[in-house]
Amino acid sequence: MLKRTRATQRFDENLNVLDERLNAPPKIREDQSGLRNVMNRVDTEITVQVDGLRREFDSKEGKVTALDGVNLQVRKGEIFGVLGPNGAGKTTMIRILSTLLLPTSGKAGVMGFDVEKEPEKIRAVINMASGAERAGYDFISARGNLWFFSQLYGIPSEQAHKRINELSDMLGLQNYLDRKFYALSTGYKQRVTLVRAFINDPKVVFLDEPTIGLDVMTALSIREYILKQAKEYGRTILIATHNMAEVDAICNRVAIIDKGKILACDTPAALKRSLGAPSLVLEVSPPPAPGTLEPLGKLDGVKGYTSAVDEERGLSRIQVVVDGDGSAQSVLDSVRKSGMTVVSNWRQQATLEEVFVALVGRGFREREHEASQ
Ligand SMILES: Nc1ncnc2c1ncn2[C@@H]1O[C@H](COP(=O)(O)OP(=O)(O)OP(=O)(O)O)[C@@H](O)[C@H]1O
Ligand SMILES: [Mg+2]
């Protein structure tokens, strides 16, 4: 527990440093405005630029619009989160930026190169990894796998081995490098994938759900490694995730995406602050039947809600984004009137989940449920 607290503190400290560098205006006197412009340009070097990006797919049910006019700018050294529910378009965006897929229309560029016109120049300066894929040859050791990938980039052998050791050290992988890939646990396989993602000293790294399915401690050490890669080596890291805690812990900025559109883009703190009033959380029993909660969304001052059943305790937890005390009271009245027992209720500072709820009226769970129907 102590270890975890320390790690968390270190995240905060690191984030503060990053925030300072990215967000603090350069300290230049007013009478040196020429210099200010030059400094600004250096401080805000854009490494990923996306303009009006659109991607459609043909499917059995007809045309699917995965990205619907996305605009983004990511700066050097930034850890940028793309947060959205299943099917929002996150992986499609990463595939386009890492030159695995072409846009239908619009523009996307990395380090000043265009994904359509100069894909090979982009490939030389980026890397990409997905948490869903376990990339590695089973009957080769972890070290052998990493060496193989390093050779695809033409890294001299000695240098490659040095780099494998250094990166593995940062992730606590050293003692596992000589095990066959198949014999590694999920967490260690994922660590290998994350060493591979940085093997070529990339300027920009795209990570698709880097900690999906991992235990808390493994996820923490991977996040710490990602932070270090951005902070100490100035790499730009774009992370697609549906994990709000991950975004809160390590992202300088986050774009919230739903149905192929960016709904908001700012620092996690600014997005949470934008909600103003604390949210209302209720635990009700018995869990409400489908549709019972819908009237809540129509109450004055209610921006949206999300709910989840806690089967162990036989109740439902409802998070409601309200604009103040009055609307919180009318939510409580309405729930009681509908026959549910309010077991407990409290107000809490908004989380990124509630930011999404305020933007869409629904949470990730409801959004994903809607999409699957
Ligand atoms: N090759 C494809 N053919 C047809 N439809 C596709 C294809 N790839 C993606 N889509 C559709 O495009 C939309 C966006 O998919 P995408 O994988 O980018 O979402 P995502 O945000 O990464 O979701 P998840 O959180 O589930 O990974 C979805 O509706 C998906 O079904
Ligand atoms: Mg995806």
Image (tube, grey):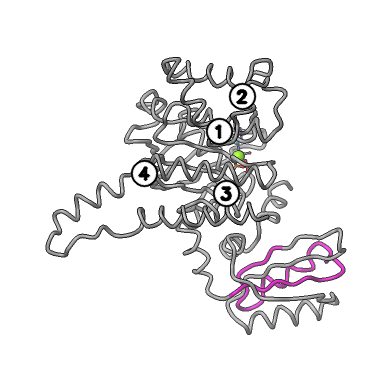
Label 1 to label 3: alpha-carbon separation? 28 Å
Q: Which quadrant of the picture is home to ligand 1? A: top right
Q: Identify the residue under disc 4.
A: 76
Residue 251 higher or lower than 109, as above or below:
below
Q: Amino acid at mark 4?
A: Lys
Q: Amino acid at mark 1?
A: Leu
Of the numbered discs 2 and 1, the one sitting upstream in the chain is 2
**Mark 3 or mark 2, whichever is nearer to me:** 2
In the image, is the residue at mark 3 within 8 Å of ligand 1 by its beta carbon? no
Q: Position of residue 273 (x, y in %)?
A: 50, 69
Residue visible at 57% across and 55% down?
8
So how many labels did they put on this image? 4
Identify residue for label 1. 194
The residue that label 2 is drawn on is 177
Q: Determine contact: label 1, label 3, CB under 8 Å.
A: no
Instruction: Name the secondary structure under disc 4.
Output: loop
* Residue 137, image x, y percentages: 64, 18
Q: Nearer the viewer, mark 2 or mark 1?
A: 2
Tag in front: 4 or 2 = 2
Front in this rendered view, residue 57 or 207? 207
- Give the Cα distance between marks 4 and 3: 27 Å
SS for dot 1: helix
Q: Amino acid at mark 3?
A: Lys
Does residue 302 appear left or right of residue 276 in this picture?
right
Give the SS element for disc 3: loop
Q: Which residues are magenta?
A: 278-306
* Magenta stretch holds residue 329: no
**Label 2, residues with CA under 10 Å away: few <14, some 14-19, many ≥20:** many
Nearer the viewer's eye, disc 4 or disc 3?
Answer: 4
Q: CA distance from mark 4 to mark 1?
A: 20 Å
Which corner quadrant of the image does residue 346 belong to? bottom right
